Amino acid sequence: MSNRFFVLILAFAWLGLGAPALSENAYRDYLSNDGRLRLRTDEEFNKTYNPHTILSLQSPDGLIVLVTSQERRLTLTQLYDGLPSSFGDGCECVGRVLLDLDGEEAASFLVKGMFPPEEESTHDTLYVVANHEKTEYTFMVHYPIDLGDDGFELAVSLIQKFSWQPKPKKDD
């Protein structure tokens, strides 16, 4: 009887100590093509090809993440004030806020009617622009319309799982 009790205690101790390690393995890392950005999440994504992006992901439940980069053009204030009027026909910016993206303030917008382009919209979009060093990064998290507020909260949570990576060292 005492041996079973001892084995049971050891089993619970192993599970208690092993659980954090097992849950840590549940996270996946997705690195941008330029090596400057990492998404660490427990969400499952497939990397997809998009020649205009540095990161393109799609989840089995229809969540789409696109990240682009270009040389920094505008200040954060200019982005926050000017971007809502730049969204194309059929798009409506219904809210904006500043979000934190790994220590950088990011101009963030809830946009309806953006995805898919040139078709009837099936997704709402969290559209986020952050300046990091000399680069402007644009993040678009498209989530199915039927998710409503839950989709928006999921998109915001996902943005906050991105982190900046050190510049890759050039080989000499």
Image (cartoon, helix red, strand yellow):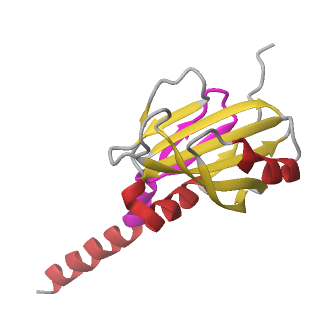
Q: Nearer the viewer, residue 12 or 119?
A: 119
* Region of the chain picked out in magenta, as a range: 18-42
Question: Do we see residue 27 in this rendering?
Answer: no
Most distant residue in the left direction: 1
Most distant residue in the bottom direction: 1
Q: What residue do we see at 26% from left, 72% from top?
A: 11
Residue 172 x/y as whole percent: 81, 13
Q: Is residue 161 left or right of residue 134?
A: left
Q: Is residue 140 left or right of residue 167?
A: left
Q: Nearer the viewer, residue 15 or 46?
A: 46
Residue 107 x/y as whole percent: 74, 54
Q: Quadrant of residue 62?
A: top left
Residue 138 x/y as whole percent: 68, 40
Query: How many numbered discs?
Result: 0
> Is 20 covered by the magenta stretch?
yes
Task: Give the answer, above or below, for where 75 lies relative to 32.
Answer: below
Q: Nearer the viewer, residue 116 or 120?
A: 120
Task: Give the answer, above or below, for where 48 lies relative to 42.
Answer: above
Q: What residue do we see at 58% from left, 46% from top?
A: 91
Q: What residue do we see at 72% from left, 39% from top?
A: 137
Most distant residue in the top direction: 172
Q: What residue do we see at 57% from left, 60% from top?
A: 156
Question: Do we see residue 141 in this rendering?
Answer: yes
Task: Give the answer, above or below, for where 153 lies relative to 47.
Answer: below
> Is 23 covered by the magenta stretch?
yes
Task: Give the answer, above or below, for where 64 lies relative to 81.
Answer: above
Q: Quadrant of the N terminus?
A: bottom left
Residue 19 x/y as whole percent: 38, 65
Q: Is residue 16 left or right of residue 153?
A: left
Q: Nearer the viewer, residue 161 or 106?
A: 106
